[in-house]
Image (tube, helix red, strand yellow):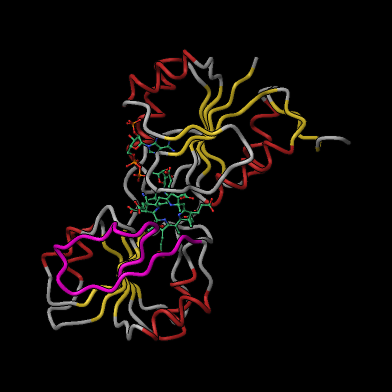
Amino acid sequence: MTRILLLGGTTEASQLARALADAAADADAVFSYAGRTDNPVAQPLPTRIGGFGGVDGLIGYIRDQAITHIVDATHPFAAQMSHNAAAACAQTGTALIALERPAWQAQAGDDWTHVPDLEGAVAALPDDPSRVFLAIGKQNLAAFAAKPQHHYLLRLVDPGAGISALPHTSTVIARGPFDVAGDTALLRDHAITHIVAKNAGGTGAEAKLEAARHLRLPVILIDRPALPPRETAASVAQVMAWLAHSGTVSTTERGV
Ligand code: 3Y8
Ligand code: NAP
């Protein structure tokens, strides 16, 4: 019996979950969230929430649940999960594919500064007090306490997730995907002068980049962390074909 573990938490993971739920699958699949947010979007698959307990915990889960295939559809910055999945699959001989979205590429009119990591993003900010949209969630805000002179606009998924180490902040509670009109209004209403973002790729977070282009605002874009070597797919269809090829999922729609 084929059992698929879908490591989720992204727009593409939700799209794949829908495709798996709709396929005439002779395999079953379980969707996995880390438990980072209070009320994650419901999925059309049985869902587990929380860490596995490192590589050994994931190996235990693979064995206990007789997982035969893992699809890593986590976010490009969820590097630890991706490393753990690659290690656990290597040690257990479990099939693994990563659903990866391409990094964003600058277009005409973009004013982007690429930096290798969070510290690079802090260093790229000016010294003069500015108004900075930190569109990086809540887990990595502490690094910006090194430049307390700026007013920071934080966009968080859950309330109460900001940190006091940043003396001047405004907070917006919002769960993406976001749109250009909304992000343009946000940048205008808060008189933003700089944007800091992760090079997440995909469609759910790119609205702010288009808004920045319209408003001719500079963007400091953090490069993705290194990920382990693994087979990758660039689309849901490619993952479904990979699963069909391994005989786990027939790609005919249910009921046809
Ligand atoms: C818990 C599941 C779907 C998934 C939607 C995508 C799009 C909207 C845009 C901004 C950027 C940011 C952040 C963001 C986006 C999608 C996708 C994406 C960026 C949810 C979700 C979980 C998370 C975790 C959360 C992190 C945070 C990062 C906010 C659900 C909504 C900044 C990444 O408050 C926290 O603790 C937030 C933590 C990890 C980064 C960070 O370090 O703080 N995502 N985001 C997943 C889990 O528990 O396993 O709650 O429904 C999913 C989505 N967030 O199904 O449509 O696919 O990228 N998520 C970034 O890209 O920079 C917001 O504000 O412009
Ligand atoms: P991370 O740093 O790579 O992982 C840290 C630990 O969280 C992992 O070692 C694992 O714990 C647990 N974990 C991560 N993803 C998991 C999943 N899908 N299911 C079960 N456990 C998971 O991860 P992160 O950057 O905090 O991201 C957490 C979640 O948010 C992921 O689902 C990711 O797709 C989503 N997300 C992240 C970002 C981002 O910017 N990082 C953006 C959008 C969505 P154990 O070691 O205990 O197994």
Given residues 109 and 208, the one toward you in this image is 208
Q: Residue at x 29, y 78 (%)?
A: 194
Asked if 154 appears above or below 28 in the picture, the reply is below
Q: Quadrant of ligand 1?
A: bottom left
The stretch drawn in magenta includes residue 146: no
Rendered location of residue 67, percent (x, y)? 53, 19
Given residues 246 and 74, the one toward you in this image is 74
In this picture, residue 150 sits left or right of residue 244: left
Rendered location of residue 94, percent (x, y)? 50, 19
Q: Residue at x 17, y 64 (%)?
A: 144
Q: In which quadrant of the rendered image does the N terminus lie?
A: top right
Residue at the far right in the pictured view: 256
Q: In which quadrant of the rendered image does the C terminus lie?
A: top right
Given residues 129 and 103, the one toward you in this image is 129
Q: Residue at x 64, y 32 (%)?
A: 242
Span of residues in magenta? 154-176
The picture quadrant where one finds residue 86 is top left
The picture quadrant where one finds residue 165 is bottom left
Asked if 104 appears above or below 65 in the picture, the reply is below
Asked if 154 appears above or below 43 in the picture, the reply is below
Rendered location of residue 161, percent (x, y)? 29, 57
Report the predominant secondary structure element of the magenta stretch.
Answer: loop
Rendered location of residue 197, percent (x, y)? 34, 64
Q: Residue at x 67, y 36 (%)?
A: 20
The stretch drawn in magenta includes residue 157: yes
The picture quadrant where one finds residue 111 is bottom left
